[in-house]
Amino acid sequence: MGMTRAEITLKNVRDDAYAQCGHIKEEEIRTATVTAVVDTGAMSLVITEELREKLGLAVKREKIAKTANGQRITCQVTESVEILWKNRYMAMPALVVPGAEDILLGAIALEGMDLMVNPVTQELVGIHGDNEEFIIYSFSHR
């Protein structure tokens, strides 16, 4: 399998709330459009320290994380950041991995936005299509 990359936009959720309340202007919301590695083996959104600073994300705590090679490292956990891909979005904390060079879009974000990697084209796609409506809950109607 090849490596899948996707362009995503990350937005400071706190700034967005301040803008909605009129405390800052809409154009003052800190955002960044980045190319992320879609990593179905990673759980979290992983960002660099540089990106954390650019977005103004506060560090909420530290966490021990395990890398793909089994190494345990201490990472910072940020406040929530909104992830936007095409017409999909969700908010979640990000892990700031020391020395990270790539942004990783992990399984929790993929699941939350109803996304998957198409195994044939190696592209990020909506599980239930790429329209604005996607299934969150499935239930039967009697």
Image: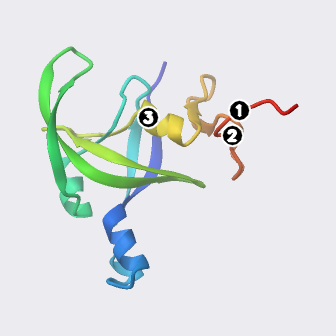
Which of pointers 2 and 3 lies earlier in the amino acid sequence? 3
Q: Earlier in the sequence, mark 1 or mark 3?
A: 3
Q: In the structure shown, which secondary structural element does the residue marked by tag 1 occupy? A: loop
Q: Position of residue 93 (x, y in %)?
A: 31, 46
Is residue 27 positioned above or below 103 on the image?
below
Q: Please say whether residue 86 is visible from this viewpoint.
A: yes
What is the residue that sits farthest to the front in this orientation? 142
Q: Quadrant of residue 104?
A: top left
Taking the spot 43% from the left edge, 77% from the top edge, the residue there is 20
Disc number at residue 108? 3
Q: Identify the residue position indicated by label 2 in the image.
A: 135
Quarter containing the C terminus: top right
Measure the C-alpha gap from mark 1 to mark 2: 7 Å
Q: Secondary structure at mark 3?
A: helix
Q: Mark 1 near mark 2, Cβ–Cβ under 8 Å?
A: yes
Q: CA distance from mark 1 to mark 3?
A: 18 Å
Find disc 1 in the rendering and name its residue: 138
Q: How is the image coloured?
A: rainbow
**Which residue type does callout 1 highlight?**
Ser
Q: Of the residues tagged 1 and 2, which is closer to the observer?
A: 1
Q: Amino acid at mark 2?
A: Ile
Q: Between tags 1 and 3, which lies in front?
A: 1
Give whichever of 122, 39 is nearer the camera: 39
The x and y percentages for residue 130 are 69, 45
Amino acid type, mark 3: Ile
The answer to the question of whether label 1 and label 3 lie on touching residues, with beta carbons closer than 8 A, is no
Q: Is residue 10 above or below residue 62?
A: below
- In the image, taking residue 122 as reference, residue 71 lies left or right, namely left
Residue 30 shows in the view: no
Q: Is residue 64 above or below residue 55?
A: above
Helix, strand or loop status at disc 2: loop
In the rendered view, tell whether residue 80 sits above or below residue 128: below
